[in-house]
Image: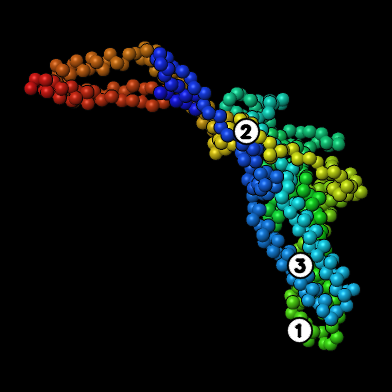
Amino acid sequence: MNTSKSQAWSYSSNGTDMAIAPPKPNPKRLYQVWKGNNKFLCRGRIVFGHDAGSLFLTSFMIGGPAITFCIRMIVMTKGQNPFFVYPVLIGGIVLTVLDFSFLFLTSGGDPGIIPRNSQPPESDEASDITTPSMEWVSTKVSNLKIPRIKDIKVNGHTVKVKFCDTCLLYRPPRASHCSICNNCVQKFDHHCPWVGQCIGLRNYPYFIMFISSSTILCLYVFVFSWINILRVRGNIWSVMSRDILSVILIVYCFIAVWFVGGLTVFHFYLICTNQTTYENFRYRYDKKQNPFSKGILGNLNEVFCSKISPSMINFRAWASEEEDAVASGSTTSESERGFVNSKEKFDIEVENRYSNDAGKGLPLILQNLDYSSLRDNVKRKNLHHIGVDNKLKSVSVPIGREQYSQSSSTVGSSTSKRTEASIS
């Protein structure tokens, strides 16, 4: 029985071969075969980044002080003015709930992942010239050449877009490939380790609300912890020595507000100038005009008042056979997938040149010579001249880039042994 990956063969009763269709594999959802480093929950409804475990640390750093403050206010309800304690307690609970809500909306949603291609796009700008400003990629399947960088027009300005070797697509303007999550993301801002997710087009508004609510929560706990100390009559140092919990909250929030507050101010600056963190650190639009800026009001409206665009990927959709095959071969190299990098291309060209030129250095009569008959003649001579085998030189036969040598002395010795065996 002969088997293969595509079909199996069996013999029928009359002796003829019959092809049996292989069993169909179980269908899979797209999130089950996704090649990115994402982690999915609820059967693909929740999309986390590669380092989603950092959410536990972030939740502890936010929830610990906030819950401690709320418990402190509940304890103060005994013997304190309820018109002061209950509103402060409710405000702390509301801010904590909002902060956690924006945290999980930022971390558990699609940041704007761009679908991958299983094959490279058709090149409309094929060029045989490689310049320092334009590299190209090639495939083994065909002599297709794809420019590494293309120029497109955005609001009258020239913007360069790059070809992604991993996703096999030209990234849209402002998109970039995240090396941690292994995805191309629309309007890529940065990968935030605190939320364990890429920050892109679809979750950037939630991220802004998360860091803003975190800043407000820090200031809220800081201010009312001071008020709780100052409301007690007596020496402030003696009051602080008796209320250690409020002192710890004051110190913690004072340190935290510099980090989260500074981050909030920086991102509001980026929003007003319509930049991303990636663009601010790499392109420096302050030295040239930003083609995406719409003015301060327009930029603010774009982030806070615009509808969030729908996801480009339905991770719960059934994966096609092509996507399943690509995912099963995700560990293959670029050369196995059809792509050729510069080093592999050089090796292939050299190998083809040697294989085409093999034997060109020999005369035509030697190229067409039948060496098998020559070896038979040597054997016949050795049967009659056993003592001459040590004087014969080795015969070398060039084939391609390798040379296979057959020593006539070895032939002579082997045939002499056969002759002696036959005589005996």
Q: Secondary structure at mark 2?
A: helix
Q: Quadrant of the N terminus?
A: top left
Mark sitting on residue 188: none
Measured Cα–Cα span from mark 1 to mark 2 = 65 Å
Image position of 295 with respect to 7: above or below: below
Total marks in image: 3
Residue underneath mark 1:
242
Q: Quadrant of the C terminus?
A: top left
Q: Position of residue 261 (x, y in %)?
A: 80, 62
Kind of residue at disc 2: Glu
Classify mark 3: helix, strand or loop. helix
Question: Which residue is most to the front?
Answer: 13
Return the disc, 1 or 3, that comes first in the chain's sequence: 3
Q: Residues within 10 Å of mark 3 (few under 14, many from 20)?
A: many
Q: Mark 1 touching mark 2, by CB under 8 A? A: no
Q: Is residue 259 in sight in this rendering? A: yes
Considering only vertical position in the picture, is 190 above or below 380?
Answer: below
**Amino acid beneath label 1:** Arg
Which numbered disc, 2 or 3, marks the residue that appears first in the sequence?
3
Residue, disc 3: 66
Front residue of 370 and 9: 9
Of the pair 308 and 21, the residue shown nearer to us: 21
Q: Label 1: state its secondary structure.
A: helix
- Left or right, 84 with respect to 112, comes to right
What residue sits 87% from the left and 69% below the top? 87
Q: Residues within 10 Å of mark 2 (few under 14, many from 20)?
A: some
Q: Is residue 175 left or right of residue 136?
A: right
Q: Is residue 293 left or right of residue 184?
A: right
Residue for badge 2: 323
Q: Position of residue 51 (x, y in %)?
A: 64, 53
Label 1 or label 2, whichever comes before in sequence order: 1
